[in-house]
Image (cartoon, helix red, strand yellow):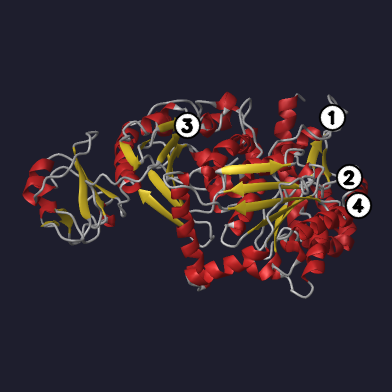
Amino acid sequence: MDRLAHRRQFLSTGPRIAACVTRLVPLLNPPLSNARHSHSKTSGKHHLHPPFAGGYQRKTSSVAWQLAVERNGASKHRGCIALAGAAAAAIVATAADGRARCDQRESLHRGPSNTVHYGPQNPDYVPLWQRHLLEPSDDNPSPTLVPPPTPVLAGSNLHHRYVVSFIGLPLRGKAHMARRLQRYLEFFHGSYVELFDINTFDETRADDEMLQALSDFFSDEEASTEKQTNFGRAAVIYASDTCGATNSMWSGYSKRRRRWMSETLEKELHAHICFIEIKLEAGSAGTQSDLLNKFQADYQDNVCRQRGLSSADMEALIKDFAQDFVTIQDDGTEDDLSYMRLINYNQKVVANNMMRGFLGSRMAAFLSCVHPYRHTIYLTRHGESKYNVEKKIGGDSGLSSSGREYALRLAEFADLEISRQADGFTCVTLPPGSGGKVRSLLTKVPQTSYAEVGIYARGIWEGLGDGAAGVRDGMRLARVQCGEHQPFQDPALTVDGLVDQIGDGPASLIFVSGKAHLHGKDLRPARLWTSSLRRTKETAVHIRHPEIDLGGGKMWAQMIHRVFRNLDEVYAGDYEGLTYEEIKRKSPEEASLRKLDKLGYRYPRGESYYDLIARLDHPMRQLETSQEPILIIAHQAVLRLVYAFLTGVPRSSAPDLEIPLHTVIKKEFDGTGKIQKETRIYLGPNPVKDDGQRWPDP
């Protein structure tokens, strides 16, 4: 039997055996659905193997499975049932202990807020879809036991235990920085990371309890000298209430306490600590610090409001704390420690002994980009492409007719919503001959103290055209498009003039919030990113780039088009330009392999989601740096991962996220963690219902 036939037979028969075992013993931990299958060319028999990794009582389980195979190597179907029963009987005696161990391990991935953290769940760091390649065969009796490390899976196999401690005065965004660091290390480097809030421990026993919690986190009963899977974990210490944590030795707010923390962790846990001090310095007028002070005042107001304190009370607390706080010394007495000093966040960065290990250097690179200020990010896929219409994947096709229309609407959205901060963007597509119908639904409003002169909506618009359901009483008409694929223009000043302007042809009307100011020059600076592929660049082609006067002789080129190859769509390799139905007919086993491991599956001579994660590391660090709103025009697979990283969705769930065509996803954040607002704005026109970007069922 040739290799391809062997692979197909494995894929057709193996899952049925696994399903049978899974139904019979669903309570075993780890799940028997993780069992691997192999096929012997000489005997023609299928073999089940114990779960590959992460199992309790690894040696005992393997022996139990071997006994089950020896005692029940009967016919295919009866043997399958007997095998499942024997395996269950042999392993169930240790199931309770195994579940307890797994529960204990799971608890290690929960922080004080009981939030599940999504580091790698497999200590062997092998993508699921590659595991059958590690089995001996007649052609390869001595296979590679572990394939080369995948960058985004190898982070937790580093030979260091890291503890990161955030220190500094109150209201510096330390908790936010700690959460962002945790998210970054877990998502992009597959590390186990847990947050330890000093304020959650009993004040009378806080020092001992913290040390015990850290010890529990780093302990791993299954670790050995050959496979130290507990090394490379990272614990992050911070205080949600800096002033309330001053009595703890773990606060690190003095030179003596930092020395105690370093020596205690090295002696008791063989762990390496690095300190991250966040420091704000006043700047001279006319410098970048003017903007920094504006953002800091906004951030401080948010925190005070959430804690029920006045600004004066908070300032008094900060002054009292500052009298005792000792900054990291630069006189040489603390040069043996690993630390970073983030002065005005990413304005000035001092790193000491941070580059000696991989994880330390990655932390330094990321933390030098993060800030706690408000940030707005707009995500959108390119307009509908010709390949979307033909249900093809990959390639570098241009936009379809519908996609070109979306590009026109996105340009108006960028001008009105992003630059001019007009809320409620709604685009209505009117069929031919609708001029008379809209006459009664519009009214002219004169100039007032709260609104500009213009035409405003009234009454019920629902059913009048695509997008009409979003029009509300009092919304202002901002732009008009007369005919398909025509540029948008300012509307007429009267209702009668607008009806004449529309005429008998199809038209599109854009409405925004009634309080929007559409003709002022007070534009908000913003950025524009796209991939290097044709369909994203064509989607951005109509976006305008006026110059904005920032004062002090500085000018800002609005939304200058920046191209990132790292944002390109996942490369489909041999399957570029094919539909999924064509792939299924050509290589039916590929759908099964992808379903087995959506993140790890790699297109033949192409890329996987893991490859995308690796190349998104750099642009996501740049995204953290920016303070201006950013519009990102990219592709479905890429935006799934960007969205997952920003919102805390586990990366294993990213391939199932919906990123619809012709829709802008607006995400608003702030450093307090309290503001995380999402708005989805459908711009139209209606794209194809099935763009061919989903794998069919195997």
Along the polypeptide, which appears first: circle 3 or circle 1? Answer: 1
Q: Earlier in the sequence, mark 1 or mark 4?
A: 4
Answer few, some or many: residues within 10 Å of disc 1's Cα (few below 14, many 20 plus, some between 14 and 19). few
Mark 4 Cα-neighbour bin, 10 Å: few <14, some 14–19, many ≥20:
some
Q: Mark 2 highlights which residue?
A: 73
Task: Report the quarter where the N terminus lies.
Answer: top right
- The front one of 527 and 494 is 527
Label 1, label 4: how many angstroms apart (C-alpha)?
24 Å
Can residue 263 be seen in this snapshot?
yes
Local crowd size for mark 3, using a 10 Å CA cut-off: few (<14), some (14–19), many (≥20): many
Picture coordinates of residue 580, whole percent (x, y)? 53, 33
Residue labelled with disc 4: 64
**Residue 292 point in image, percent of width and height:** 48, 50
Disc 4 to disc 2, C-alpha distance:
14 Å
Return the disc, 1 or 2, that comes first in the chain's sequence. Answer: 2
- Residue linked to disc 1: 143
Amino acid under label 3? Ser
In front of the other: label 1 or label 4? 1
Q: Position of residue 480 (x, y in %)?
A: 19, 43
Left or right of residue 8, residue 92 in this image: right
Marks 4/3: CA distance?
52 Å
Question: Which amino acid, by three-letter code, is at mark 4?
Answer: Ala
Q: Nearer the viewer, mark 4 or mark 2?
A: 4
Quadrant of residue 368 in the image?
A: top right
Distance CA(mark 3)–CA(mark 1):
39 Å
The residue carrying mark 3 is 531
The reply to whether callout 1 and callout 4 are in contact (CB within 8 Å) is no
For label 2, the SS is loop
Sequence-earlier tag: 4 or 2: 4
What amino acid does circle 2 point to? Gly
Q: Is residue 496 above or below residue 614?
A: below
Depth check, front residue: 522 or 72: 522
